[in-house]
Each structure stands twice: as structure tokens, then as C-alpha cells.
């Protein structure tokens, strides 16, 4: 898919790095659970897998107030226009995580005679990070969010701690 | 015994077949076959006996559709399966004036099979988008190649 | 005065859209409101339709097993059990006793986790943020136990035709006992946080009344039926698997309001704990798979209807087989489909806040309605 937003009009230079650091460490996801993966997304926000330590526990229901859309679940053809509209309602800069096999490529529901689903979120909206699994473990989603942070700040996390 | 009460209630309706089912093999105690025109009276008889509509679906056979209603009761274990053979281009009479719960079941059968229900209060598609033009559970349905 | 000024009074149409924090998934409700009161509420479903029944006709019996876990992901093991029992009936297989006990134990653990999630998410809808933290904490213990045995946390695919594929060990049984002890010590926490909370009582008492007549006409099953006073539970009225061996009660309510349904679900969690304890005590030794399970599942021609009791109500599977490796037709009779159809009648003349409370107390899972 084409780039989601054009080049920014104003470059802030070094301030841009600080802004990106701020954006990455305080992502506000949208409550967009479509199916089973939504439960694991809820579990990520809870006490055991605590998403709050990464700054992302503030799940906003309204798309106007969030900058991260975690597509958790199968996108049916009836729901696809709503997904696109919600994506367009989010203000830039915005990112999308495709969580679960259904959002990546249709998952267990994709077969040649399928009539009801859109096999993959990246067919309708641009996706930044793919988190595979059916459903992915909450740790997997956290890894996806940390990868997104790396993508936003364009700098890696401390590698020796990451791959331990 | 609820089974005997039901058999007595269904006897005057002149149904094709009211027989005992093999519960261990099929899960139903009573197997009934009825014509589409008799279904409203059958439903009324089941409601008067205190049964609830457990499930309603259709099966697409090559010669005709087979509409299958399952009734059960909260008080006593007695599951009744009512089979209604329906011709391919025919419509069916709604029982939603007797069992309001059948409203959604009939909409679903209309959506997935294309069977029309006369006098239904709100016969619109239920599961597929409103502008869809196919009925997916028909045996000759093929999803198009560009289904994304 | 209004007529003098020529002002016209109309109803206001509000869309409770498919993306909403309190609709438990992708449910859309079209509301027509007169001020704050709702005159008409029409649920629009189908946003989660994935074509399970069509997939069943395109897959053979064993390939359809993973689908069942995705129909209702919160109590997936009961759906697995219903499908396995239905096909075992068609094939004429007898499941060994140890496998039945394992099925019941894991099923009841899953039921508790489903009710716990309902409890937390429902109170989140009503505006309370603390109970969901407690519930998910308890739930994680169950998920750890089930993860050890089945391999997955949420959408299980553990049972096979004829039994279960992997056995449980002593550590699992000890873990179950510890968990039951721990959960029982939490009831007073939940009581103090929620049941005795005056805000919850005001929002839940005498709201969303379901009459017995509505139960029969709409075919409602599960805790909402038992909340209205009808003691119908398939585990007792049509016993299957190893349930006749256990001693448990069916909690019922009296008035049929939200508070009764809430109390029924809490009491059901306690009854599930009782079943798990008894199963841990009585667990027999023996094989876990039936003898002579055919390699190619090709049931004889015929049809079967099998019902089980899930956390939401009665789940029934109607399978028509033509003697082929693929089923001819599978119908999934899901409890949320019937339970949701009464919603438009319940919603008339209520406030929007009560509407959310009623919807949550019916405990729907949208992919189950849409299949």
C-alpha cells in the first residue's frame, strides 16, 4: 500500500528525535478487538503482563484520541469499511499493528472458497508491525510494541537484554 | 410423559410421520415430518405443550431443501426434530408470530440459503452485508476468485 | 407551548457502532431515542461472520476441530467437547473413563475462566476498573494450568475423537487443588468490592427483567434462564460425559433481573470448584483414548444433535453426514444467538446506561452469534 502520510512539511531537526522518543514511549492504543485476539490484548493491559510499564496502557475508545490501532481479530467483509473509516479518523502520526494470524493473512479462516473475510489487514490499511500467533501470547504483543518503538525512534533497544 | 403428550397433540394435525427417535444415536426422542403448510399448527402445538424452539436450520439436498426444527422442554428431557421438506423455488410460512425467537433463525436461513418466509416482520439479511447478492450455504455456491 | 412555537418533536437516532468499548465485540445497535429513553433498539450483527458452517462443508471432520475453539473462545473446551461427542455418537466410539474425567476437569476450569472474564469485563462496562484486575489475575492461574496440558492459552483444541491426546500429571491435579483453594479465598474480596457495592446494587436490581414466558418464546438458555427461576442445566437434565458422577447444584434466581444473573454466575463458579475437587479425588487410572479410532473419520450416514452446557447457555451441534470424509452440513446452535434476540424487547423504555448494563448481563460473545 502507498505511504500513509506524506513527508512532513516542517523538519524539526534534533527536536524530531526527542518527539519520536516521546511518541514511542507513550503510545495510546485504540480498543479495537474484533475476535479472539482481543482477549489477549486485554490480558496484556492487565496486572501480569502489564503494558503500563511501556507507557501504552491507556486504551482509548475514540479513534480521534489514539495513535496506535491494534487490529486484533478477523476482519470480515462487513466490518472492512468500518476499519478503514476508523483508520482515517485517527490523527497522524499513526501506526498499525496487525495482531494474530487473521489480521496478517486471514489466519485459520483462509481457504479457497472463503466468502466472508478480508484475508489480511494490510489489504485495506498500511500495517507497521505483524505479530503472528493464534492468538499470540501477550509477551508476543509486547514484543510487537517494542519493535514498533524501535521503528518510531529508529534506534534499537539494548540488544543484549532483548534477546536474552 | 412429554413424548406421549406431544404425540397426542400432533395426532389430529394429520402429519406424514410421527415416530420415536433413537436417542442414543441421533439425540432426538421424537422425529416428525410435516408439510410447509402444517408447520404453523405444529409450532402452536409445541408451544402449548411448553416446548421452546431449540434450533432451526436448513439443509440443501439435491432434490429439495430440508428445514429442520428442534424443540425441547425445560421441564422434561424430550427433544423433537421436525423435518419439513421444501421445494427449491418455494417459500415457507413463518412461525415468528408464535415463537418470536424464530425471527432471527428465519432471517439467517434466508440469508444463507435464499428461502423466503411469508409474512415475516423483518426479512432482511442478518449475517452477510445488506447488499450481498449470494447465498453461501447452497451447494452450488462458489466464492469468486477475487475474494479480497 | 411547544405546539405554539411550531417545534416538532422527533426521535433521535443514535448508532452504538461496531467499534465500541462496551459491546463485547463487533456488535452494532441502532437506537431510536426520545431524549434519554430508548424507544427502539435494533441489533445489527454479522460484523464477525467468518463462515464456520461453510468451512465445515469444505473440511474433513478432523480439520474442523480448530474452528470450534474460535466460535466461542472464552469457553472453547465445551465446544470441542460437543463436537467430539457428536462425532463419537456417529462413529459409535466409547470414551474411556479417565478421558471423561480429564474432559470434565478442563471444561470446568474453562467455565470458571469464562465467568471470571465476564465478571471483570461487565464491571468495566459499568465503570469499575478494579474488579477486572483481580479477575484477570485469577484467570492467569487457570490459563497456566490449561497451558501445561493443552498447549494453548485461549483457543483450545485439546479433545480428539475418542478421548484426549495427552494425559494430565500429578502436578496438574495438585495445581487444580491449589487453584480451587485460592479462588475460594477470593470470594470475600469480590463480595466486598462488588456484591455489596451500593452503586452496583442500584444499577442491577430490578433492571433488565426477563420473564419465564420470554424464556420459552425466545429459547433462552444458560445463566439468564436460571436467573429467571427456571432450573434447566443440560449437565443435570441431559447428563453427558462424566457429569453424573459428580454432586453439584444448579443455582437459580427469583426475579430475573441483572443482579440475579450476576449471583447465578458467581454461584456457578463455586459449583465448578466443587466439581473440580471431586474430580481430583475420584480420578481413575486407565487409557485416555478409545480403542480402534479409525484413521480416516468417515461416519455412517445419518444425523445427530448433541447439546452441552457452556458458560453462556446451551450449545448444540446438528451434524448431517452422508458417509463422506467431509460433513454434509453442520449447524452450530450457539447460545448467544438466541439470547441476543430478546435484547430488542428488553431495551425498550430504558436509559442508555441501563442498555449497556443489560447487554453485558446477557453475556454475549459476538463471534458466537455471527459464526
Image: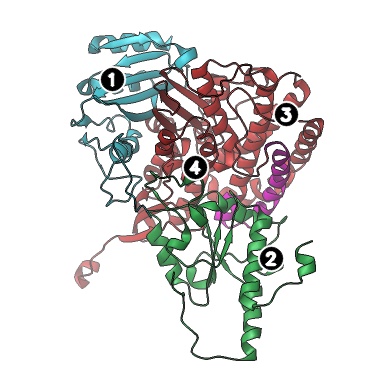
Chain colours: A green, B cyan, C red
Compared to residue C270, the image places residue C15 above or below, namely below
Q: Position of residue C314 (x, y in %)?
A: 50, 30
Q: Secondary structure at mark 1?
A: helix
Cα–Cα gap, marks 4 and 2:
31 Å
Marks 4 & 2, CB-CB < 8 Å contact: no
Spatial distance from mark 2 to mark 3, Cα to Cα?
38 Å
Split into 4 quadrants, where in the image is the C terminus of chain C? top left
- In the rendered image, residues at marks 3 and 1 fall on the same chain: no
What chain is tagged by disc 2? A
Measure how far apart labels 4 and 1 are at the Cα level.
30 Å
Identify the residue at image location x=30%, y=19%.
Answer: B45
Q: Which residue is mark 1?
A: B42
Residue hosting label 3: C167
What element does badge 2 sit on?
helix
Q: Is residue A159 above or below residue C321?
A: below
Q: Position of residue A162 (x, y in %)?
A: 75, 65
C196 sits left or right of A128 in the view:
right
Instruction: Considering the whole magenta stretch, tell me its main secondary structure.
Output: helix
- Residue at left offset 44%, top offset 39%: C52
Numbered range of the magenta stretch = C121-150
Q: How busy is the neighbourhood of tag 3: few (under 14 within 10 Å), some, or many (20 plus)?
A: some
Magenta segment includes C257: no
Task: Name the secondary structure under disc 4.
Answer: helix
Amino acid at each position: 500500500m502507498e505511504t500513509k502520510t506524506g513527508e512532513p512539511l516542517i523538519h524539526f531537526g534534533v527536536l524530531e528525535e526527542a518527539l519520536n522518543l516521546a511518541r514511542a514511549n507513550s503510545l495510546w492504543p485504540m480498543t479495537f478487538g474484533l475476535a479472539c485476539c482481543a482477549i489477549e490484548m486485554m490480558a496484556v493491559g492487565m496486572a501480569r503482563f502489564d503494558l503500563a510499564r511501556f507507557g501504552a496502557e491507556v486504551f482509548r475508545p475514540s479513534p480521534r484520541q489514539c495513535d496506535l490501532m491494534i487490529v486484533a481479530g478477523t476482519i470480515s467483509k462487513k466490518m472492512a469499511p468500518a476499519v478503514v473509516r476508523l483508520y482515517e479518523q485517527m490523527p497522524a502520526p499513526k501506526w498499525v499493528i496487525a495482531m494474530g494470524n487473521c489480521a496478517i493473512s486471514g489466519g485459520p479462516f483462509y481457504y479457497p472458497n472463503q466468502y466472508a473475510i478480508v484475508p489480511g489487514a494490510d489489504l485495506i490499511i498500511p500495517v507497521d508491525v505483524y505479530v503472528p500467533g493464534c492468538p499470540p501470547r501477550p509477551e508476543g504483543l509486547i514484543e510487537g510494541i517494542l519493535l514498533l518503538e524501535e521503528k518510531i525512534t529508529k534506534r534499537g533497544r539494548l540488544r543484549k537484554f532483548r534477546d536474552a | 410423559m412429554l413424548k406421549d403428550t406431544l404425540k397426542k397433540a400432533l395426532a389430529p394435525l394429520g402429519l406424514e410421520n410421527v415416530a420415536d427417535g433413537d436417542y442414543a444415536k441421533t439425540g432426538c426422542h421424537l422425529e416428525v415430518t410435516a408439510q410447509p403448510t402444517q408447520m404453523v399448527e405444529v409450532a402452536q402445538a409445541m408451544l402449548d405443550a411448553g416446548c421452546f424452539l431449540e434450533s432451526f436450520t436448513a439443509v440443501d439436498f439435491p432434490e429439495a431443501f430440508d428445514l429442520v426444527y428442534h424443540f425441547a422442554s425445560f421441564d422434561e428431557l424430550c427433544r423433537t426434530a421436525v423435518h419439513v421438506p421444501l421445494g427449491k423455488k418455494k417459500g415457507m410460512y413463518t412461525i415468528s408470530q408464535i415463537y418470536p425467537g424464530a425471527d432471527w433463525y428465519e432471517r439467517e436461513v434466508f440469508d444463507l440459503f435464499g428461502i423466503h418466509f411469508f409474512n415475516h416482520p423483518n426479512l432482511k439479511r442478518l449475517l452477510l452485508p445488506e447488499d450481498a447478492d449470494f447465498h453461501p450455504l447452497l451447494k452450488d455456491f462458489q466464492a469468486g476468485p477475487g475474494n479480497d | 407551548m411547544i405546539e405554539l412555537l411550531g417545534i416538532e418533536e422527533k426521535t433521535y437516532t443514535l448508532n452504538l457502532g461496531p467499534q465500541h468499548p462496551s459491546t463485547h465485540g463487533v456488535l452494532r445497535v441502532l437506537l431510536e431515542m426520545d431524549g434519554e429513553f430508548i424507544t427502539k433498539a435494533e441489533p445489527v450483527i454479522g460484523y464477525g461472520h467468518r463462515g464456520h458452517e461453510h468451512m465445515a462443508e469444505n473440511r474433513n471432520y478432523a480439520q474442523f476441530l480448530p474452528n470450534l475453539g474460535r466460535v466461542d473462545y472464552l469457553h472453547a473446551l465445551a465446544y470441542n467437547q460437543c463436537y467430539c461427542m457428536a462425532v463419537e455418537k456417529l462413529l459409535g466410539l466409547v470414551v474411556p473413563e479417565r478421558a471423561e474425567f480429564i474432559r470434565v476437569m478442563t471444561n470446568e476450569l474453562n467455565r470458571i475462566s469464562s465467568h471470571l472474564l465476564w465478571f471483570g469485563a461487565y464491571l468495566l462496562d459499568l465503570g469499575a476498573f478494579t474488579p477486572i484486575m483481580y479477575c484477570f489475575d485469577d484467570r492467569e492461574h487457570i490459563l497456566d494450568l490449561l497451558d501445561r496440558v493443552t498447549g494453548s492459552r485461549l483457543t483450545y483444541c485439546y479433545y480428539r475423537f475418542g478421548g484426549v491426546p495427552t494425559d494430565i500429571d500429578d502436578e496438574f491435579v495438585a495445581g487444580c487443588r491449589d487453584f480451587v483453594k485460592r479462588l475460594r479465598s477470593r470470594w470475600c474480596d469480590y463480595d466486598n468490592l462488588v456484591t455489596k457495592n451500593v452503586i452496583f446494587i442500584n444499577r442491577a436490581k430490578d433492571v433488565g427483567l426477563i420473564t419465564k414466558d420470554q424464556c420459552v418464546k425466545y429459547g433462552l438458555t444458560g445463566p439468564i434462564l436460571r436467573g429467571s427461576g427456571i432450573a434447566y442445566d443440560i449437565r443435570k437434565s441431559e447428563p453427558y460425559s462424566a457429569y453424573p458422577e459428580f454432586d453439584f447444584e444448579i443455582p437459580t434466581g427469583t426475579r430475573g433481573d441483572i443482579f440475579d444473573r450476576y449471583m447465578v454466575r458467581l454461584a456457578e463458579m463455586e459449583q465448578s470448584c466443587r466439581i473440580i475437587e471431586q474430580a481430583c479425588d475420584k480420578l481413575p487410572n486407565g487409557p485416555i483414548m478409545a480403542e480402534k479410532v479409525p484413521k480416516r473419520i468417515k461416519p455412517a450416514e445419518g444425523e445427530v444433535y448433541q447439546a452441552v452446557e457452556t458458560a453462556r447457555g446451551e450449545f448444540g451441534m446438528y451434524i448431517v453426514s452422508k458417509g463422506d470424509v467431509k460433513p454434509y452440513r453442520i449447524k452450530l446452535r450457539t447460545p448467544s444467538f438466541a439470547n441476543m434476540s430478546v435484547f430488542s424487547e428488553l431495551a425498550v423504555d430504558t436509559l442508555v446506561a441501563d442498555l449497556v448494563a443489560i447487554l453485558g448481563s446477557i453475556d454475549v460473545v459476538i463471534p458466537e452469534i455471527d459464526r
